[in-house]
């Protein structure tokens, strides 16, 4: 079983990329009281933030609780397999606390929704765009997840690619 430090180390390049994209995205963020629209020029997408969420240089955050407990990000990743299904298969394992894995469509593109649970509950969507994968991720404390899940799904379904 992969421990938390190994998982964080494996995710470090993605987190750094997300932070850089967050800086770029600030130019397109409405800066309002949460639930606004976020623009990710390097990803080529816009999306509605969940109600009560806002965006800054480090990502998306709920405006309640500790910011690290309710965090989100969006970034581009290279497709590391022959298909999106195979790409996600390496990420979606029982050891990581897989709760569900569902195929969905986001703005007409093939996508896979993953929900995992450990110290945090994660709602992740992997969207295939050519030879790249757009990753949108929301993390929250397990006790808050069921209330937030519909808002996460609505945010993902609001994505429009440019």
Image (cartoon, helix red, strand yellow):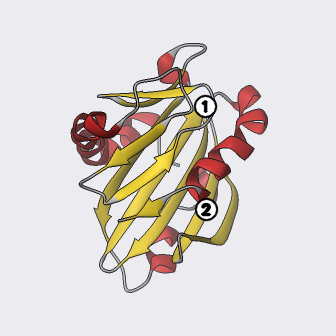
Q: Nearer the viewer, residue 101 or 155?
A: 155
**Where does the C terminus fall, quadrant-wise?**
bottom left
**Residue 97 visible in the snapshot:** no
Please determine whether, in this image, residue 96 is positioned above or below residue 144: below
Within 10 Å of disc 2 (Cα), the crowding (few <14, some 14-19, many 20+) is many
Q: Residue at x 31, y 60 (%)?
A: 44
Q: Earlier in the sequence, mark 1 or mark 2?
A: 2
Within 10 Å of disc 1 (Cα), the crowding (few <14, some 14-19, many 20+) is many
Image location of residue 60, percent across then percent down: 45, 32
Please determine whether, in this image, residue 123 is positioned above or below residue 87: above
Q: Which residue is mark 2?
A: 113
Image location of residue 1, percent across then percent down: 53, 49
Looking at the rendered structure, the secondary structure element under dot 1 is: strand
> Can you tell which mark lies on residue 81?
none
Could you tell me if the residues under marks 1 and 2 are in contact, i.e. CB atoms within 8 Å? Answer: no
Image location of residue 58, percent across then percent down: 32, 29
The span from disc 1 to disc 2 (Cα, nearest Å) is 16 Å
Judge from the rendering whether residue 46 lies leftward or rightward of residue 65; answer left or right: left
Looking at the rendered structure, the secondary structure element under dot 2 is: strand
Image location of residue 33, percent across then percent down: 52, 20
Please determine whether, in this image, residue 70 is positioned above or below residue 50: above
Q: Residue at x 30, y 57 (%)?
A: 43
Judge from the rendering whether residue 15 lies leftward or rightward of residue 146; answer left or right: left
> Can you tell which mark lies on residue 140?
1
Of all residues shown, which one is farthest toward the top?
65
């Amino acid at each position: 079983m992969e421990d938390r430090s190994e998982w964080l180390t494996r995710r470090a390049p993605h987190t750094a990329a997300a932070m850089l994209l967050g800086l770029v995205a600030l130019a397109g963020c409405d800066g309002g009281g949460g639930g606004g629209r976020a623009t990710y020029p390097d990803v080529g997408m816009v999306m509605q933030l969940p109600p009560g969420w806002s965006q800054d240089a480090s990502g998306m955050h709920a405006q309640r609780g500790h910011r690290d407990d309710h965090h989100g990000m969006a970034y581009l990743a290279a497709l590391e397999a022959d298909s999106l299904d195979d790409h996600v298969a390496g990420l979606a394992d029982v050891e990581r606390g897989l709760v569900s894995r569902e195929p969905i469509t986001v703005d007409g593109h093939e996508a896979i929704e993953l929900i995992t649970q450990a110290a945090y509950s994660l709602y992740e969507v992997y969207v295939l765009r050519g030879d790249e994968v757009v990753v949108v991720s929301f993390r929250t404390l397990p006790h808050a997840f069921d209330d937030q899940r519909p808002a996460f799904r609505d945010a993902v379904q609001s994505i429009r690619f440019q």
